[in-house]
Image: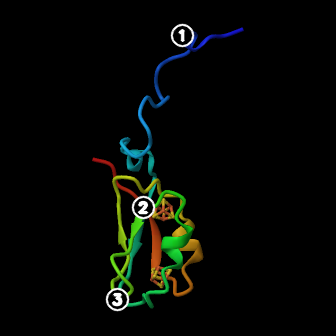
Amino acid sequence: MSKHQDIPLTPINTESSEKVRTGDWRTYIPVFDAEKCIKCYICWKYCPDAAIKVKDEESLPEWDLFHCKGCGICAEECPKDAIEMILEEVE
Ligand code: SF4
Ligand code: SF4
């Protein structure tokens, strides 16, 4: 039977995802159109990474791209199509 020493260290994390830049795993990035947003915060509620922040019920949602993994759930669930997933350019 294999032991952990037998497999490479990466991509296994040694820190909790709170500290790890999980945004580096992203292929697609959410692009937000504030003009379409009705502040329903459904995106915030569905994000599995808590990568969408809402200061208060008057504020527009904001994206924490350090942690957003680009899953696209926010874009899928937004009732106003205010979020579009775009292929992210890597420099
Ligand atoms: S789900 Fe869409 S409309 Fe609702 S707060 Fe998020 S971006 Fe705005
Ligand atoms: S793309 Fe996924 S991880 Fe990123 S903000 Fe939207 S729901 Fe959260």
| Circle 3 residue | 58
Q: Are marks 3 and 2 in contact (CB under 8 Å)?
A: no
Q: Quadrant of residue 58?
A: bottom left
The kind of secondary structure element at disc 3 is: loop
| Circle 2 residue | 51
Q: Is residue 30 above or below residue 35?
A: above
Mark 2 Cβ and ligand 2 under 8 Å apart: yes
Label 1 neighbourhood size at 10 Å, few (<14), some (14-19), many (20+)?
few
Q: Is residue 62 above or below residue 51?
A: below
Dot 3 or dot 2: first in sequence order is 2
Give x and y (percent) for residue 35: 36, 90
Q: Are marks 2 and 1 in contact (CB under 8 Å)?
A: no
The kind of secondary structure element at disc 2 is: loop
| Circle 1 residue | 5
- Furthest-left residue in view? 91
Dot 2 or dot 1: first in sequence order is 1
Tell me the amino acid under the disc marked 1: Gln
Q: On residue 78, which mark appears? A: none
Tell me the amino acid under the disc marked 2: Ala
Give x and y (percent) for residue 30: 43, 67
Dot 1 or dot 3: first in sequence order is 1
- Furthest-right residue in view? 1
Label 2 neighbourhood size at 10 Å, few (<14), some (14-19), many (20+)?
some
Q: Quadrant of residue 6?
A: top right
Tell me the amino acid under the disc marked 3: Glu
Looking at the image, which is closer to me, 71 or 15?
15
* Camera-side mark, 3 or 2: 3
Looking at the image, which is closer to me, 34 or 3?
3
Q: CA distance from mark 1 to mark 3?
A: 51 Å
Q: Is residue 85 above or below residue 67?
A: below
Label 3 neighbourhood size at 10 Å, few (<14), some (14-19), many (20+)?
few
